[in-house]
């Protein structure tokens, strides 16, 4: 089953326990403040008041950083994910 978020929502798979991606290391003292996740799917973006579509910045496959209270827990085919607004993501990692 494929889950496609609406509007500016993003489906994230939390990288549980993972603290390093490439050269980026999330320090131990940030363990309770930030989490890493992989973007699984995104909505099309959000609409301005004039109807113009603003596309999503994050794309499937990106590794992102977000706070521990961001998003809503969902289960799809028995697997845990987070659904959150793109604005709850603090940033992403690039090689």
Image (cartoon, rainbow, N blue to C red):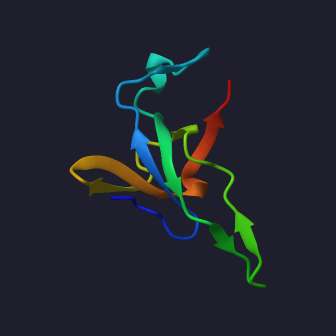
Q: Is residue 5 above or below residue 50?
A: above
Q: Is residue 31 above or below residue 35?
A: above
Residue 68, x across and y down, in percent: 41, 42
Where the N terminus falls, by quadrant? Answer: bottom left
Residue 55, x across and y down, in percent: 71, 63
Q: What residue is rendered at 32% in x and 54% in y?
A: 73
- Left/right placement of residue 75 relative to residue 13 reads left
Q: Decide which of 13, 86 is in the foreground and name it.
A: 13
Q: What residue is rendered at 66% in x and 58% in y?
A: 56
Q: Can you name the residue that lies furthest to the top here? A: 23
Residue 29, x across and y down, in percent: 46, 20
Q: Is residue 84 above or below residue 7?
A: above
Q: Is residue 54 above or below residue 65?
A: below
- Left/right placement of residue 38 relative to residue 16 reads right
Q: Decide which of 1, 29 is in the foreground and name it.
A: 1
Q: What residue is rendered at 44% in x and 47% in y?
A: 12
Q: Can you name the residue that lies furthest to the bottom here? A: 50
Residue 87, x across and y down, in percent: 60, 56
Where the C terminus falls, by quadrant? Answer: top right
Q: Decide which of 87, 79 is in the foreground and name it.
A: 79
Image mark count: 0
Q: Can you name the residue that lies furthest to the left here? A: 78
């Amino acid at each position: 089953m494929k889950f496609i978020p609406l509007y500016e929502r993003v489906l994230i798979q939390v990288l549980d326990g993972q603290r390093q991606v490439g050269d980026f290391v999330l320090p131990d003292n940030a363990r309770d403040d930030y989490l890493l996740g992989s973007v699984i799917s995104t909505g099309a973006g959000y609409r301005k008041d004039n109807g113009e579509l603003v596309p999503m910045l994050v794309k499937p496959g990106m590794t992102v950083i977000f706070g521990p209270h961001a998003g809503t827990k969902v289960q799809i085919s028995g697997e845990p994910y987070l659904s959150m607004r793109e604005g709850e993501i603090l940033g992403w990692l690039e090689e």
